[in-house]
Image (cartoon, helix red, strand yellow):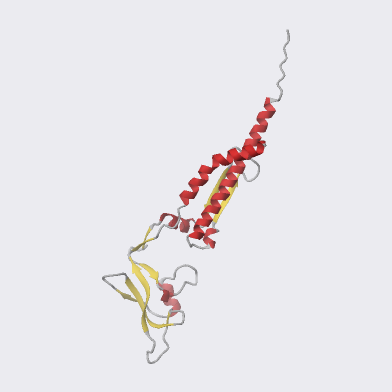
Amino acid sequence: MKLKLDIDPDIVAMMEAEVAAGEKAVTAAMREAGTGLKAAWRGQIAQAGLGRRLANSIRSQNFPRSGESLDAAALVWSKAPVIIGAHDTGPLIRSKNGVWLAIPLPAAGKSTRGGRITPLEWERRRGLRLRFVYRRTGPSLLVAEGRLNTKGQAVVSRSKTGRGKVTAPIFLLVPQVKLPKRLDLDRDAARALDSVPGLIVANWVDERL
């Protein structure tokens, strides 16, 4: 006796189709999760008042870069990790030489290189010497003898009579400063991770339909 078994529909073809649908669903889900996390981090940075430029330092990349895979992944990172990390953790910052941190006051102006101006750069640009003033009940100071221009910045006084000459505080000197925590990136990352199973199911169902 000869028996013949025909299976209809083709189970192998069904499984292959299901695997393909799974690959598309996982890849789409990871792409959505990564894009969503990038947008959430950028929004959080902008809302913290840290500027659009820093917000745009957040980037994302999907893997594989082309095609679909059940092992698809998304990477979200910042091109300015030190700055982002500082605002995310709120670290305690100390002077590199263990003495003072110089915090520029409005009369100091801004650095030509971006960021905060240093006492050395300030003296070179203004042509004035900074003088140390110790205070027992508050932060010590670096001050300069000059006049304040229309921008409120200390500059060399050209007056021969000394008219308008002031002693202007230029820098506050502190041993350390606690940077406030302004971001919570782990919160958004956890939400993105929690959303992945639901995104996979939703994309898998859409693929089947």
Residue farthest to the front, as pictured: 209
Q: Is residue 147 left or right of residue 198?
A: left
**In the foreground, 153 or 98:** 153
Residue farthest to the left, as pictured: 136
Q: Is residue 17 visible?
A: yes
Q: Is residue 71 left or right of residue 16?
A: left
Q: Measuring 70% from the left and 21% from the top, which residue is drawn there? A: 7
Q: Is residue 23 visible?
A: no
Residue 70 drawn above or below residue 7: below
Task: Where is residue 3? Give x, y as percent.
Answer: 72, 12
Q: How many marks?
A: 0
Residue farthest to the bottom, as pictured: 161
Q: Measuring 42% from the left and 83% from the top, which residue is drawn there? A: 156
Residue 133 drawn above or below residue 205: below
**In the foreground, 193 or 123:** 193
Dividing the picture into quadrants, the one containing residue 24 is: top right
Task: Where is residue 95? Give x, y as percent.
Answer: 36, 63
Point out the image quarter for the N terminus.
top right
Dividing the picture into quadrants, the one containing residue 166 is: bottom left
Point out the image quarter for the C terminus.
top right
**In the foreground, 188 or 91:** 188
Task: Where is residue 84? Give x, y as percent.
Answer: 47, 57
Residue 25 drawn above or below residue 54: above
Task: Where is residue 150? Give x, y as percent.
Answer: 46, 82
